[in-house]
Amino acid sequence: MTTNITLQDSVRARARIAGRIRQTALLDSPSLSRLSSRKVSLKLESTQITGSFKLRGATNAVLSLTDEQRAAGVVGVSTGNHGRGLAYAAAQAGVRCIICMSELVPQNKVEGIKSHGAEVRILGRSQDDAQVEVDRLVAEGMTMLPPFDHPDIIAGQGTVALEMLEQAPDLDTVLVPLSGGGLISGVGMVLKAANPGIRVIGISMERGAAMHECLKAGKPILVEEKATLADSLGGGIGLDNAYTFEMTKAFVDEVVLVTEAEIAAAIRHAYFEERQVIEGSGSVGIAALLAGKIENPGRCVALVSGQNIAMDLHKRIIDGEDVDVEAETKGGADA
């Protein structure tokens, strides 16, 4: 099955959100280039206004609402960055916003969402638990804007690929953090439309890599959500997934998994070598390169998806501590 989300949808989304999001820099990485023997650059969506790429899709979706939907308000379920982007986009458009989250979401991300004026509701220990409250609010008339499985969200995320093509027209390989698939669906769709020869590689963590497990199963399945340094990549893809599962199958050439230690090493590398503060989910492309898990990358761009890490956790990681967030979460610590 193919979807009807096209390159032109992302082109229109780019025009729609212009002036409301930031065109982010493409930073050449001498250290990663030496390691890979080819030019490697980092697409710094971590420097987006809300600290992650999620603002693109959220802004496109909010600006695409009908007048009736705007009046009723929007609701979303989030591991943090989508909620922050949706809260900001809704505030800018004067639309009421409620974000439902699980207990696994770090407190710094909860506070970030609240700072943009959205109401936050914490429910259960998974996105599926939070989704129950979302469904109730939708039944009352609010519009749900999901984190990834929505045409306007996907088209909006694809605008980052339009920028990459202009900044690096000689692209061979793009490394994209992979969770529910909204980012990689939009990016893959745009890149493959421009040049089918560009390799699109999804990178996820070993702990709870939902899309990876679904692809192996050949259909959307339930995957246990686990605590991980790449917390923004947590959560399932939804058993009723309408877009991103098929788009990921169609546009992604390979999926690579990285360990918690490799994620931590990438966070340290970004800080000491690139002078960048990034969160675990944003580091996974760097992690895969450092671990030698990307064969023949050629002219490569690693998409750094976000920077919204708790700074106390960041300090522990760059100080060399072997952080195990799964053990800390089970023990009741705030990681």
Image (cartoon, helix red, strand yellow):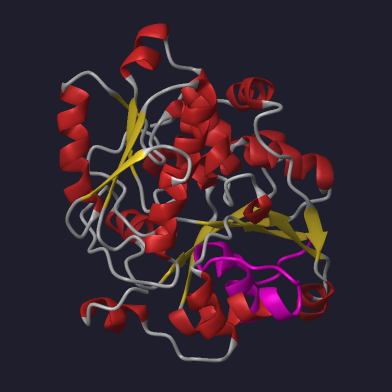
Left or right, 33 with respect to 257, comes to right
Which sits in the foreground, 237 or 269? 269
Q: Is residue 12 above or below residue 317?
A: above
Span shown in magenta: 270-299
Number of numbered labels in the structure image: 0
Q: Residue at x 43, y 56 (%)?
A: 109
Q: Is residue 198 above or below residue 272?
A: above
Q: Is residue 203 above or below residue 119?
A: below
Asked if residue 304 is among those painted magenta in the image, a careful observer would answer: no
Q: Residue at x 65, y 30 (%)?
A: 20
Picture quarter with the N terminus: top left
Which sits in the foreground, 208 or 221? 208
**Residue 60, x across and y down, in percent:** 54, 26
Residue 169 in sight: no
Asked if residue 281 is among those painted magenta in the image, a careful observer would answer: yes
**Residue 35, x across and y down, in percent:** 77, 80
Left or right, 79 with respect to 238, comes to right
Residue 19 in sight: yes
**Residue 85, x across and y down, in percent:** 50, 41
Q: Residue at x 51, y 69 (%)?
A: 280
Picture quarter with the C terminus: bottom left
Left or right, 37 with respect to 318, comes to right
